[in-house]
Image (cartoon, rainbow, N blue to C red):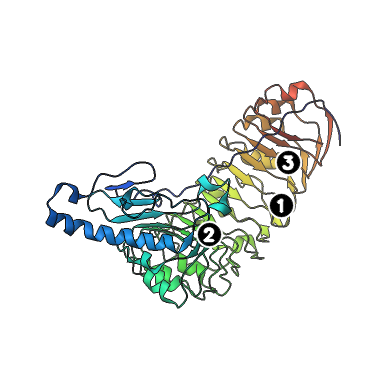
């Protein structure tokens, strides 16, 4: 590459934008208070006589004792449960949420979330989960996610006891290992809206039909679970029309080429099937007619052949990640021209060939496009001057292709651009200050 330039900028950390599921993560009980930051109103017994006080507060004490039994069974290196003390109102304990109306425990939020990212291993609770936890019959929200040191008692009673928590709307057990399969029992939690069983490493299930008994389920995450023995999974999930988010990445799924006569998933907005190594024709996949999809992740699947024309009709699509599919995919010209809501397009190492001018023409109306990653796709041609019209771009990666010619000065119009990668091409010409005059946000650059 014969590019000449004299320009550099400092490198700083990038930030990630996280995705949340719309209605699924919404507060399910408006009469509850979160003890994480403020104390709830006192229970009804505070202003009543002794008889009513005993009537209302006795269940509250039993629930407090159940939580203390849970605390005794776990190791807490960072002292996350230090506020859990006998004699104190458990509704004021960290991670505990109670009803202002009855004083019952409604929520237990002990997942290792983003506030612990600086020291996630120290923050992890470990030890045996006390069976007393399952006596919290009013519980609506249970989050133990990514406390990978926690485990259920042996003996097989835990699945049945967990399924007795009939009021659960939210359940996150990600990263917790089970002694035996838990899945079928969860079908009894008919009020469940959010379920995260990712990376639980339970026994390989042969059947997911229990999911069809959860009529309100809108968020399902089973990433990392070995579902290699489940062959009819598309038919099963198609029987859950309430789904908005479905994450089944790295699940060893056998294929996604089943034919579904009628698609019921009209509310599905996010589908993540990455890392399953399907190794079959892209156009045979069942999901291309899901026009409600906003986020579609298909990376690391060895899907090959021509994209179906139905991709061009997925007008709600905001994120399309088809990266690392071994340069075996074929995209026809102008296929993406109607995807005006597209914000992220990642085709890294996936196309068998491509023409830069045709690809740009297909995207020229995608004014919301923030990330365009076309690295390693055998793309030929020159970088069109019109690239400067994609003013929302934050990341542009055209490296590792067969591009020729000069870098257009119009690239300076990308004032929001933080990352620019043009290296490992056959570009020529001189890079001047004019190219960088408008790149006021640039932090990362590789154009050699």
Dot 1 or dot 2, earlier in sequence? 2
Residue, disc 2:
287
Q: Position of residue 10 (x, y in %)?
A: 72, 30
Q: Position of residue 385 (x, y in %)?
A: 71, 30
Q: Is residue 341 or residue 108 the one in the foreground?
A: 108
358 left or right, relative to 159:
right
Q: Is residue 254 or residue 78 the one in the foreground?
A: 78
Q: Is residue 187 visible?
A: no
Residue, disc 1:
351
Q: Residue at x 17, y 58 (%)?
A: 54
Q: Position of residue 297 (x, y in %)?
A: 58, 54
337 left or right, relative to 5:
left
Task: Spot the residue most to the bottom.
Answer: 155
Q: CA distance from mark 3 to mark 2?
A: 28 Å
Callout in the foreground (3, 2):
3
Please state, as top left, top right, bottom left or bottom right, where the C terminus lies in the image.
Answer: top right
Task: Spot the residue most to the right.
Answer: 2
Callout in the foreground (1, 3):
3
Residue 212, quarter of the rendered image: bottom left
Q: CA distance from mark 1 to mark 2?
A: 20 Å
Residue, disc 3:
398
Dot 3 or dot 2, earlier in sequence? 2
328 left or right, relative to 58:
right
Q: Is residue 394 above or below residue 410?
A: below
Q: CA distance from mark 1 to mark 3?
A: 13 Å
Residue 363, quarter of the rendered image: top right
């Amino acid at each position: 590459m014969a590019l000449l330039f004299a320009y550099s900028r400092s490198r700083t950390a990038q930030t990630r934008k996280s995705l949340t599921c719309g209605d699924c993560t919404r507060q399910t009980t408006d009469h509850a208070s979160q003890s994480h930051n403020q104390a709830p109103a006192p229970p009804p017994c505070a202003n009543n006589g002794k008889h009513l006080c005993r009537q209302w507060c006795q269940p509250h004490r039993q629930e407090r004792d159940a939580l203390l039994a849970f605390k005794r069974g776990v190791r807490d290196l960072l002292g996350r449960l230090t506020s859990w003390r006998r004699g104190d109102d458990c509704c004021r304990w960290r991670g505990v949420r109670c009803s202002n109306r009855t004083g019952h425990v409604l929520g237990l939020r002990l997942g290792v979330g983003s506030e612990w990212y600086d020291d996630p291993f120290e923050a992890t609770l470990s030890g045996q989960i006390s069976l007393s936890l399952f006596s919290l019959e009013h519980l609506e929200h249970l989050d133990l996610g990514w406390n990978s040191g926690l485990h259920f008692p042996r003996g097989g009673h835990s699945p049945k006891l967990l399924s007795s928590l009939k009021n659960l709307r939210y359940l996150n057990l990600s990263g917790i290992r089970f002694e035996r399969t838990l899945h079928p029992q969860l079908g009894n939690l008919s009020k469940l809206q959010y379920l995260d069983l990712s990376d639980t490493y339970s026994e390989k299930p042969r059947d997911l039909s229990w999911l069809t008994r959860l009529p309100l389920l809108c968020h399902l995450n089973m990433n990392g679970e070995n579902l290699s023995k489940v062959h009819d999974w598309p038919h099963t999930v198609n029987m859950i029309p309430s789904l908005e988010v479905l994450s089944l990445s790295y699940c060893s799924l056998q294929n996604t080429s089943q034919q579904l006569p009628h698609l019921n998933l009209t509310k599905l907005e996010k589908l993540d099937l990455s890392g399953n190594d399907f190794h079959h024709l892209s156009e045979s996949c069942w999901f291309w007619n899901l026009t409600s999809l906003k986020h579609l992740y298909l990376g690391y699947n060895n899907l090959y052949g021509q994209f179906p024309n139905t991709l061009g009709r997925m007008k709600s699509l905001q994120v399309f990640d088809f990266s690392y599919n071994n340069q075996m995919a074929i995209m026809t010209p102008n296929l993406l021209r109607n995807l005006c809501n597209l914000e992220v397009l990642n085709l890294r190492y996936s196309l068998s060939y491509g023409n830069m001018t045709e690809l740009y023409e297909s995207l020229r109306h995608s004014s919301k496009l923030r990330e365009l990653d076309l690295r390693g796709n055998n793309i030929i041609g020159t970088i069109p001057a019109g690239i400067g019209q994609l003013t929302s771009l934050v990341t542009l990666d055209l490296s590792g292709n067969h591009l020729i010619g000069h870098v257009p000065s119009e690239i300076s119009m990308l004032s929001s651009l933080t990352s620019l990668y043009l290296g490992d091409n056959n570009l020529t010409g001189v890079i001047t200050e004019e190219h960088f005059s408008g790149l006021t946000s640039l932090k990362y650059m590789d154009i050699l």
